[in-house]
Amino acid sequence: MRDVYFIALVKFKKKQTKAIVAENLKMVEADTKEGVKWLGIYWTLGRYDAVALYEAPSEQAAMKMAIRRGENMAIETLVAVPVEEARKLVE
């Protein structure tokens, strides 16, 4: 079974400090031990403060990762289907 792709839209709940950023980086490292593969993390301007792209072994793994960050950020997570796979679903 292949990993599932996700897009996380992030709003920070707290002002970002060096300490909070360091804590988040530790969580990113811990996520990789649980099978999460980070494809990109970007800070953004506009409605969201950051956008992250990643693969996870399951929706449950993605949810667990988001729950751990609940104190510092609000995350809206989207499941992403590669266009090649989506085309196969069209009749």
Image (cartoon, rainbow, N blue to C red):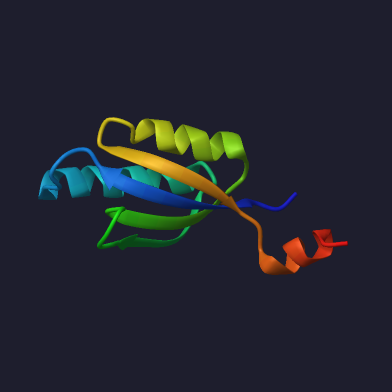
Q: Is residue 2 above or below residue 58?
A: below
Instruction: Name the image quarter holding the C terminus.
Output: bottom right
Q: Residue at x 48, y 44 (%)?
A: 77
Find residue 10 and report its horizontal and vertical position in percent.
34, 48
Query: In x, y percent, where is residue 65?
Result: 44, 38
**Is 48 rendered above or below residue 13?**
below
State the image coordinates of residue 28 (x, y, percent, origin top left).
37, 48
Asked if residue 57 lies left or right of residue 89, the reply is: left
At 30% from the left edge and 54% from the top edge, which residue is drawn? Answer: 47
* Count of residue discs: 0
Residue sitting at 82 percent across and 58 percent down? 89
* x and y, in percent, of residue 85 in the image: 75, 63
65 lies left or right of 90: left
Query: Closer to the camera, 60 or 33?
Result: 60
> Which one is nearer the viewer's eye here, 76 or 17?
76
Does 18 appear above or below 91? above
Residue for point 78% across, 66% down = 87
Farthest residue to the right: give it. Answer: 91
Above or below residue 34? Residue 64 is above
Quadrant location of residue 27? top left
